[in-house]
Image (cartoon, helix red, strand yellow):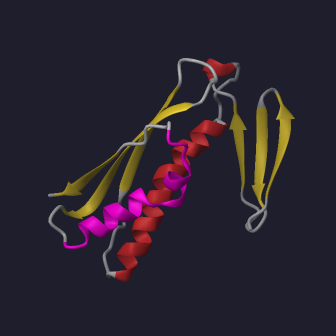
Amino acid sequence: MVEVNAVYEGSLRCSAAHAPSQSTLQTDAPKDNHGLGEAFSPTDLVAAALPTCMMTIMGIVAARHNIDLRGMQARTEKEMSKDLPRRIHSLKTVIRVPIAADHPQREALEHAAHTCPVHASLHPDIQASIEFHYAG
């Protein structure tokens, strides 16, 4: 169990504290939903959680096989639904992996990304495509 404590600060802004580390973050409603867009929105945090989770799980697999993935990068584009209820419609992720495309652990690394806990927690209606681009 991990405890997160959140406080509504007013003006559509919240703060959250991660109890184990005391790290904090702030959220703001996006400009297209009555906010100022001056911080991650709650749905932006989902868009950030997905690629960081995938890369973390890939890193666990890589460590088992002595593969150095430092410098791996991901970009996720979040699109909100145009109809109600407002929700995440799609999350398109591209992961740039700093190893050759013919690496013997490629399939294991891609499987790791597809089975990360955040990806597994997404509602099936969310289109969550993942592309892998390899070095060389």
Give the percent coordinates (x, y) of residue 19: 79, 63
In which image quadrant can residue 46 be found?
Answer: top right
Q: Is residue 88 above or below residue 58?
A: above
The magenta stretch spans which residues? 104-124
Q: In the depicted view, which residue is nearer to us: 41 or 102?
A: 102
Q: Residue at x 70, y 38 (%)?
A: 27
Q: In the depicted view, which residue is nearer to us: 16 or 126?
A: 126
**Residue 40 seen from this side:** no
Please tell me whether the stretch drawn in magenta is mainly helix, strand or loop.
helix
Q: Is residue 80 above or below residue 18?
A: above
Task: Using residue 100 as the reference point, say whether residue 124 is left or right of it.
Answer: right
Q: Residue at x 62, y 25 (%)?
A: 86
Give the percent coordinates (x, y) of residue 13: 77, 34
Q: Residue at x 31, y 76 (%)?
A: 67
Q: Is residue 76 above or below residue 30?
A: below
Q: Is residue 132 magenta?
A: no
Give the percent coordinates (x, y) of residue 6: 81, 48
**Residue 107 seen from this side:** yes
Q: Quadrant of the C terminus?
A: bottom left
